[in-house]
């Protein structure tokens, strides 16, 4: 929550943490389980049933984009040094520093101190990277 507040300039509502932690994963898991339970072979106009190798190609194409995150997680987890707990803590701890300043929202207090008639008029440019 602190990192999100640094990036967008204000703290999100507390229920957002619950949504990110519980609601979204449960909805995604529910959709996945619903799909598994109600799975049937892919057909066209209820007359042509696609061959099994066609479905395999489709699943491989879909999974090629979805498996990038878990594969890179396992790769980095096994390549890091230390115990499993130390590796997990190291890989899940955010790093904020001068190299991340372009992602941080401008300080609101410094913006409010600028008045049109003051000597220290500055142009502050803030561009979102998204």
Image: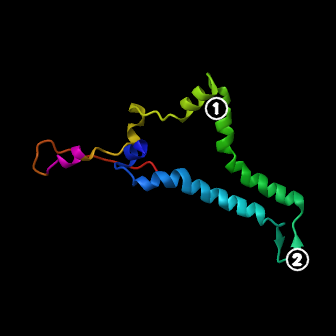
Give the secondary structure at mark 1: helix
Q: Which of the 4 image quarters holds residue 88?
A: top right
Residue toward you, 103 or 95: 95
Residue nearest the observer in this picture, 90 or 129: 90
Q: Residue at x 88, y 57 (%)?
A: 53
Q: Pick the quarter of the image with the N terminus.
A: top left
Query: What is the CA distance from the residue labelled 1 to the residue labelled 2?
Result: 47 Å
Vertical order, 57 against 48 (above or below): above
Q: Which colour scheme is used?
A: rainbow
Q: Is residue 30 left or right of residue 108?
A: right
User: Where is mark 1, residue-wise?
Assistant: 76
Instruction: Give the image quarter of residue 99.
Output: top left
Query: Can you give x and y, in whole percent of width and height, for residue 22 in the image?
Result: 55, 53
Q: What stretch is highlighted in magenta?
A: 109-115
Tell me where residue 90 appears, x and y as whole percent.
54, 29
- Indicate the position of residue 130 as horizontal and vertical percent values: 46, 51
Position of 112 with respect to 86 (left or right) is left
Quarter residue 76 falls in: top right
Check disc 2 and report the residue beneath it: 47
Query: What x and y, as percent, mark residue 43?
Result: 84, 71
Classed neighbour count for the residue bearing mark 2: other residues with Cα under 10 Å, few (<14), some (14–19), many (≥20):
few
Q: Residue 54 carries which label?
A: none
Q: Which of marks 1 and 2 is nearer the N terminus?
A: 2
Q: Identify which residue is drawn at 38% across, 31% down.
A: 98
Residue 110 lies in the magenta stretch = yes
């Amino acid at each position: 929550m602190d990192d999100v507040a640094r990036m967008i300039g204000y703290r999100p509502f507390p229920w957002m943490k619950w949504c990110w932690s519980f609601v979204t994963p449960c909805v995604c898991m529910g959709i996945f389980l619903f799909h598994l339970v109600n799975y049937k072979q892919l057909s066209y106009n209820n007359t042509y049933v696609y061959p099994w190798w066609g479905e395999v190609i489709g699943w491989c194409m879909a999974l090629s984009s979805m498996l990038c995150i878990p594969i890179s997680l396992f790769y980095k987890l096994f390549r890091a040094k230390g115990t499993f707990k130390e590796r997990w803590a190291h890989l899940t701890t955010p790093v904020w520093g001068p190299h991340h300043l372009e992602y941080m929202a401008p300080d609101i207090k410094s913006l409010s101190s600028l008045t049109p008639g003051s000597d220290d008029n500055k142009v502050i440019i803030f561009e979102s990277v998204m």
